[in-house]
Amino acid sequence: MATELTLSVNGAKQTVTVDPDTPLLFVLRNELKLTGPKMGCGMAQCGACAVLLDGKEIRTCITPVSGVAGKQITTIEGLPALWAQEKSLSAAESETTLHPVQQAWIDEQVPQCGYCQSGMMITAVQLLSKNPNPSVDQIKDAFTNTPPSPHLCRCGTYAAIIDAVQRAAQAMRGEAR
């Protein structure tokens, strides 16, 4: 039975009419047209569908939409606004500014196919919010051992991901590279 739910996605209130058990991923992609989160494994084991829920990574492929009402959902599309808010940037500045993690991914030329990268960036944002200067081992741990499960990249861009997280950390601390 479809129910009307109000979600807070990337700082905006969104009303959707869906079955409460519908996976959040389907609502984000099909109803709200946010294509950053991807369907990978469908079992929360690969990370392609990751978003932040109140600042913590979740896997949207197994999260019922009814469980996120009233909480802040941030997809990769919302990372620039998140950064702009954190840095108190003007509306004009926030329109032209990427989150440092996104910029580092570009600068380090991380993606090959790019399919898993939005989830990888979500994890990097969560890590850097808790640890502004992670070691290589801490970065590896965040992507492989920290729940919900490891992030998988079939292209094998793991070394570039580590470099990008380190670059983003420097940028977020205001250090030049």
Image: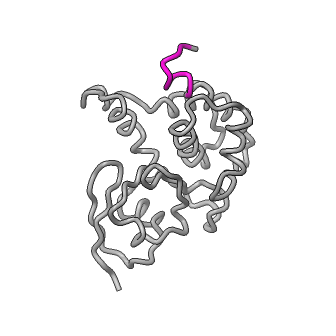
Left or right of 146? Residue 106 is left
| Picture quarter with the C terminus | top right
Depth check: give the residue in front, 157 or 101.
Answer: 101
Residue 52 x %, y %: 47, 51
- State the residue at coordinates (57%, 41%): 127
Does residue 170 show up magenta in the picture?
A: yes
Residue pushed farthest bottom? 1
Q: Position of residue 49 (x, y in %)?
A: 55, 57
The magenta segment:
169-176
Q: Residue furthest front?
A: 130
Would you identify the image quadrant in which residue 2 lies?
A: bottom left
Residue at 44 percent across and 74 percent down: it is 22
- Does residue 23 lie above or below 97 as drawn? below
Residue at x 57%, y 32% (from the top left corner): 105
- Say whether residue 149 is left or right of residue 98: right
Residue farthest to the top? 176
Q: Image check: 28 left or right of 155? A: left
60 and 69: which one is in front?
69
* Residue at 35% in and 86% down: 1
Residue 53, horizontal then vertical, whole percent? 45, 55
Query: Relative to the observer, which residue lies in front, 18 or 12?
Result: 12
Query: Image quarter for residue 8?
Result: bottom left
Q: Quadrant of residue 31?
A: bottom left
Vertical arrangement, residue 76 with respect to residue 42, above or below? above
Task: Verify whether residue 49 appears in magenta.
Answer: no
